[in-house]
């Protein structure tokens, strides 16, 4: 059995403008509704029609599946959604990606907010791994289009459950291949 996790392509709104905390909230909203840039394409191609295609239910993951395979995913799994990007109201103006890393660091340290907690997101990664395993048992080969931070946690969970990591990459279009050999 094989599970391939592919991170979506570069979103149209992945720029890095300087924004305030309220500007960052708007940036995150646009990021969540973005498709993939016209110039963003994978450097690798492993799709051969034998893979069962799934994606998160966010546009950039669905669009990435369509670009990569020429097909709409056969199933959308909400558990594959990116871990929430926390949005704390801090009195700074920073580049958008600096906000992402700063807020994620605070979030991982346990700072609460009006969004999914880090512990809840990690539990969702376990659910996603279990769903992908069930699909792999049924279809043998699964290709899942998702998101960087969630793919990292799903990959770790699959490895913890005995799947062998054959390759890992968390960049845009990054491919994480795991196989079951037992």
Image (cartoon, rainbow, N blue to C red):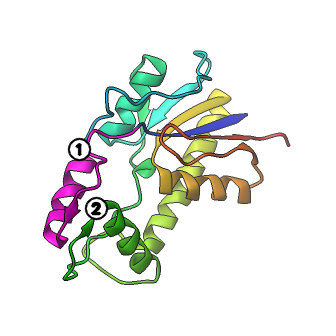
Q: Nearer the viewer, residue 154 or 64?
A: 64
Mark 1 falls on what kind of element? loop
Of all residues, the one furthest to the right in this rendering is 182
Q: Quadrant of residue 65?
A: top left
Which region is colored magenta? 10-33
Q: Nearer the viewer, residue 56 or 91?
A: 91
Q: Check residue 15 in the rendering and tell me which mark sits there, or answer none.
A: none
Q: Residues within 10 Å of mark 2 (few under 14, many from 20)?
A: many
Image quadrant for the C terminus? top right
- Residue to which mark 2 is pinned: 96
Q: Check residue 33 in the rendering and tell me which mark sits there, or answer none.
A: 1
Q: Nearer the viewer, residue 147 or 52?
A: 147
In the displayed structure, 85 sits above or below 11; it is below
In the rendered view, does 114 fall on the left or right side of 159?
Answer: left
Locate residue 117, reporting x and y percent.
39, 73
1 and 2 marks in contact (CB < 8 Å): no
Locate residue 165, reporting x and y percent.
74, 47
Locate residue 91, reporting x and y percent.
19, 82
In the rendered view, does 104 fall on the left or right side of 59?
Answer: right
User: Which residue is rendered at x = 57% and y = 15% of the image?
Assistant: 49
């Amino acid at each position: 059995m094989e599970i391939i996790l592919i991170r979506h392509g570069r979103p149209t709104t992945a720029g890095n403008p300087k924004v305030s905390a309220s500007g960052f909230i708007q940036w995150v909203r646009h990021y969540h509704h973005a498709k993939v840039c016209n110039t963003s394409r994978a450097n690798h191609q492993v799709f051969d029609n034998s893979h069962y295609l799934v994606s998160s239910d966010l546009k950039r993951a669905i669009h990435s599946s369509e670009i990569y395979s020429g097909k709409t995913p056969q199933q959308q799994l909400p558990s594959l959604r990116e871990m929430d990007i926390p949005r704390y109201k801090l009195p700074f103006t920073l580049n958008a990606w600096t906000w992402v890393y700063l807020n994620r660091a605070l979030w991982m340290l346990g700072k609460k907010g009006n969004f999914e907690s880090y512990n809840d997101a990690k539990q969702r990664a376990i659910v996603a791994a279990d769903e992908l395993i069930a699909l792999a048992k049924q279809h043998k080969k699964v290709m899942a289009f998702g998101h960087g931070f969630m793919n990292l946690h799903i990959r770790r969970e699959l490895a913890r459950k005995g799947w062998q990591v054959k390759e890992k990459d968390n960049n845009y279009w990054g491919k994480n291949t795991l196989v079951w050999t037992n």
